[in-house]
Amino acid sequence: MSTARALGKFGVVGGTGFAIEAVLMTVLTHFGWTPWQARIPSFLTAVLATWLLNRTYTFAGRGLERRSVEALFYIGIQLCGAGVNLAIFALCLLQWPRLLQMPVIPLAIGASGGFAFNFLASNAWLYARSRATARG
């Protein structure tokens, strides 16, 4: 599969993950959670969903044979991307405190930075080989 096609599919899956995270974070903040607290369960839910979708849709037939090992590597990549995402998220909230009332805006800005890292790392490292030749 071409990199451009994989990027397109990764974008669709990422958009789905973003929607899952945004909805869950919004619901939790309406129940009194701070945006910081709500990011934990919303992020973990989105990571699980995107891993399953990327494994079966974006990078079908690529990656590691063992799902558990692949999942751990995927989580590691996502955590690094989350570092980028959260740094941008935090800078937005610190720079523009009024965004605390609309946390989806800094979430979207942060997601764009994390997206680039996550795609490059997933495509180049985790899903670089077909499952038939990958060992893990």
Image (cartoon, rainbow, N blue to C red):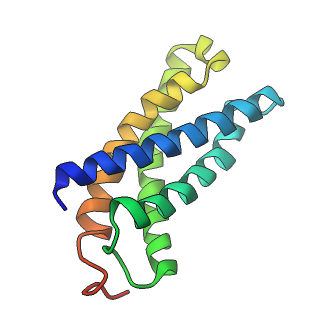
* Residue 123 pos. (x, y %): 27, 61
Kindly indicate the quadrant of the structure image that contains residue 22: top right
Residue drawn at point x = 78 percent, y = 33 percent: 33
Name the foreground residue: 1 vs 34: 1
Residue drawn at point x = 43 percent, y = 70 percent: 73
Kindly indicate the quadrant of the structure image that contains residue 100: top right
Horizontally, residue 107 falls left or right of residue 24, namely left
Q: Is 94 located above or below residue 21 in the figure?
A: above
* Residue 55 pos. (x, y %): 42, 66
Q: Quadrant of the C terminus?
A: bottom left
Residue extending farthest to the right is 31
Residue 34 at least partly seen: no
Residue drawn at point x = 59 percent, y = 42 percent: 20
Residue drawn at point x = 43 percent, y = 45 percent: 14
Q: Quadrant of the N terminus?
A: bottom left
Kindly indicate the quadrant of the structure image that contains residue 23: top right
Name the foreground residue: 50 vs 98: 50
Residue 84 at least partly seen: yes
Horizontally, residue 66 falls left or right of residue 43, namely left
Horizontally, residue 48 falls left or right of residue 40, namely left
Name the foreground residue: 92 vs 41: 41
Q: Is 97 located above or below residue 110 in the figure?
A: above
Q: Is 80 located above or below residue 33 in the figure?
A: below
Residue extending farthest to the left is 2
Count every numbered label the image shows and give the total.
Answer: 0
* Residue 99 pos. (x, y %): 59, 16
